[in-house]
Amino acid sequence: MSVISINPKILTATKKPANITCKVTSSKCGEGEEFLVTLRNDGKTAARIDSVELFSKSFITKELRVFRQGFLMPGDPCGFFTLEAGKEAPAIHYRQALPCTATQITSHTMTVIELPKSEKLLLCGFTQGRKYEHLFLLDTAGKGVTVSAQTLLEGISLQPGESLELEPLLLLESKDYTYLVETYADLLAEKNHARVPKKTVTGWIDWQYYREEKNEKDILLNAIEMNELRKKGYPLEYVVVDGGWCPYASEWLEAGAKFPSGLKKLSRQLDKLGLKLGLWFAPYITNVATRVVKEHPEWLMLDDDGKRLHRPGSNVGECHMIDYTVPGAMEWMRNIVRVMVKDWGVKYLKLDGPATAHYVGGKLHDHDMTTVAMITETLKVIREECGEDVLIEGEGLYAPSVGYVDTQRTTQDNKPSWYNPDRGTPDLKENMKNDMLSAFMHGRLWHNHRENVILRDFLSPFHARVGRKDLMLTDNELKLQLTASMFGGGALLLTDPLAELARTPERLELAGTFLPHAEDLRVRPLDTFNPDGSQPALYHATVSRSWEEWHLLGVFNWDDSHRNFKIPLNKITGGGTWHAFEFWTEKYLGRFNKDFVLADVPAHACRLLAIRKDLRRPQIVGSNLHLCQGAVEFEKVAYENNCLRVSIKHFLQKGKSLWLHVPRNFALAKTDTNAKNMLVDDRAREIIKIEFDGSRRTEFEFRFKRG
């Protein structure tokens, strides 16, 4: 029986209801319980209801630890936070879902609570979000911490005798955090008919380096470089043109002066190179100087005073918002998408901004439709016009996007800075944390997407802030970014000018450490709800192949100084003796049968361990070809009659290495291979390093003798 009791009540109403009754029904939902609230107007006058509170629970405790998920939109920080009774709530460096006091934070759509004086965790989450915005308000005012669940109805009218069914709320208890969030994601996927692509998006996007300053020539030059990389085996498919390709960044059927040939011709040129065009599209806001503002002012959202809702600044400049509940507006957008897809040949639509934040302070033309319901209708139309073959990337509110988008941004724009140099708030640090804590959604709701990975060791002249030059990632930060991106799952787009990047081939070749994708990787944080309030630093994935099952452990130092980490080996493996090999330092750490310490991990750095069971015979313990250390690049590994056979298939095999553990009662007698320039380094006791230049498919046959 849950500690939460569902006791709905009307919180606020524009027009006070005379007599609203709330009926609650519940049903078993897996190991949890799902609650459905129905409102009925038993009065004689209409009511306009703004918000409903489904429950409010005060936990009388000094501290309450919670997981806050960023379902509001990409960049909304997710993580583990400690709320202390009678003190201010933790600072969240992003928009809240509603105005909050100093003692309040919100968690959009779902949250996980560590129940006081209990070993159990409680997940509270709405399993649909097509019509309404849902949030959990956490308040530290008073002697405890209060958690309440709210559904925002935005003044929907309820006529006398009329009923309104809200969207269901799930309560689920378990000791296992991973079980809770993965079960929740599975339910969301089932109820909302999630779309999960067959393979992960790869390619190149212009935004992080060029911003709005790119032109047609820049795109084509990078496409030509991409084609050359494809010939070498790089699995790159999409070229994504981001903001700035059209006038005012919102004249959607007109290419700007920097694209004189037009998008249709560009798409055809890419097609000849074997590449697909992706295009940025932000139809919810429009620059004040655009044609639609001049020709259809009735489509613009108004505020309570009947004036146009206005934003002095946005990613399209000074802007107004489009109200898609006004007749004609939706067909206007439908036609734009149809032209992009059917005429121009766009294969990837980067959909920016299906977010409620744009519409705060506004009033929809249809007073009985919520902002979320309007967004859902736009997503439905866009999906219809894109059909099954065009991928849609979502970049806004999560819940209504399930079932309509193929990929979903789970982080804000990637930046070459650990901290924002102007505000001191986390940049890359925040992105990578959000990325990995969102991994439970990848492969269930959609494919996650972080927009890009930054590999360059040179500055961008277009990305500088006023009075500052661009920044670069340190070597440690670069490697942490790559590891976290692989662990987070999802789309991986290069973003640097490829000809320039090729001048430092060791940077470009880092792409080979995370491509191709390990499509079946499922990553979970190990150290959740830490008593000191820190974010998880240990992320684990089990890799299973026909020849072996092993573990990957990412150790992430979010701090600004060196740290030691205790590795919970038995929690990961369940017991036994195991080899540990670290990818980035290329070090064999040893054999372990109990927890051990990984010492001196530098600030902003990570370590990636492959943990393999000790088989007491010659075996592979490490590889520097791919971050997964065998999950992608090994086609087959077999051991029989003192012979270890390894088949490697990967597009980058120059200057690569394998590490073999050879017990003392074995010795390497002979090696047969089609690799070139092979060097056997057997100076270290029981560890043999095999250096080689391979082909697309490289075969090794290592023969051992006993004694």
Image: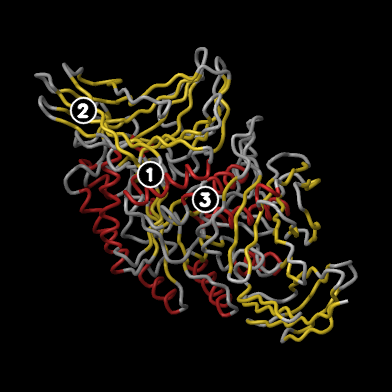
Residue 372, horizontal then vertical, whole percent: 30, 40
Q: Are marks 3 and 2 in contact (CB under 8 Å)?
A: no
Residue at mark 1 to residue at mark 2: CA–CA distance: 26 Å
Q: Residue at x 21, y 45 (%)?
A: 296
Q: Residue at x 78, y 46 (%)?
A: 597
Q: Is residue 187 above or below residue 682?
A: above
Q: Amino acid at mark 3?
A: Ala
Which residue is tagged 3? 439
Residue 289, horizontal then vertical, whole percent: 33, 46
Label placed on residue 30 = 1
First-in-chain label (1 vs 2): 1
Callout 2: few (<14), some (14-19), or many (20+) C-alpha neighbours within 10 Å? many
Residue at mark 3 to residue at mark 2: CA–CA distance: 36 Å
Q: Please state if 530 lies on the left or on the right of 12 as rendered.
A: right
Residue closest to the eye, 300 or 146: 146
Q: Please state if 580 lies on the left or on the right of 281 as rendered.
A: right
Quarter occupied by residue 119: top right
Q: Amino acid at mark 1?
A: Gly
Say what secondary structure mark 3 lies in.
Answer: helix
Quarter occupied by residue 82: top right
Q: Please state if 657 lies on the left or on the right of 30 as rendered.
A: right
Which residue is tagged 2? 39
> Which residue lies most toward the top here?
142
Residue closest to the eye, 365 or 370: 370
Quarter occupied by residue 452: bottom right
